[in-house]
Image (tube, rainbow, N blue to C red):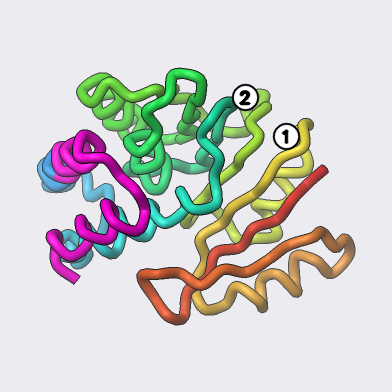
Amino acid sequence: MQEQEVIKILKEDLKFSDVSVAKLKLFSESLIKANQKHNFISKNTELDLWERHILDSAQLVKFIDFKSGSLADLGSGAGFPGIVLAIFNEKKSFKVNLYEKSPVKRGFLQQIVNKLDLYANVLSNVYENEIKSEIIVCRAFKKLDQVIQVSREIIKTPHKLIVLKGQNAQEELNKAFKNNKYPYKLEKSITNDKSEIIIINFN
């Protein structure tokens, strides 16, 4: 899927504004440039950046209420999905918190937050912070059972956990829910027929 095709979906289906799309372009340019030195994402996926990384992250806006409160992205890496969601968010009443243990990646994330004037905070390792967000998202952070463990131990308030997963989503759910079961639903990814989005509510 080419950049223009993705932008059409972002605008028409996911309701990204022209301002947000312009910021996504600046973000993608900065990432490609930084990737030459730091290898934040696989070089093989640079040509697929808009579909593989940006659209994959952007689809989560369908499951998030941006009116007020905050969102925590665990293991933000190069900014997926956190930076993309922060770009979509245009409300001062909603804050996106990006948790990343790598100082180099944190530096890049902070640079993007400043450059694009985003309502976001860049924070260190999830284990070093108290998390009180109502929405928790992650992509390529840890295996699902470990994500749930972090969710239960570190996040003390009721929250919705949204995890982007590949074709083994159900298998990981079965393993994660061996001892404790929580209400969840699976949503199909719009970027890959075999990938799914896991949504779990913790009260």
The residue drawn where x is 57% and y is 77% is 168
Q: Secondary structure at mark 1?
A: helix
The residue drawn where x is 75% and y is 65% is 176
What x and y, as percent, mark residue 45?
22, 64
Q: Which residue is mark 1?
A: 154
Q: Which residue is mark 2?
A: 129
Which amino acid does the dot numbered 1 rest on?
Ile
Q: Secondary structure at mark 2?
A: loop
Which amino acid does the dot numbered 2 rest on?
Asn
What x and y, as percent, mark residue 170?
65, 76
Q: Residue furthest right?
A: 179
The residue drawn where x is 70% and y is 60% is 145
Crowdedness of circle 1 by 10 Å Cα count: few (<14), some, many (20+)?
some
Contact (Cβ within 8 Å) of mark 1 with mark 2 = yes
Crowdedness of circle 2 by 10 Å Cα count: few (<14), some, many (20+)?
few
Q: Determine if residue 43 is in view.
A: yes
What x and y, as percent, mark residue 106?
36, 29
Q: Determine if residue 37 is in view.
A: no
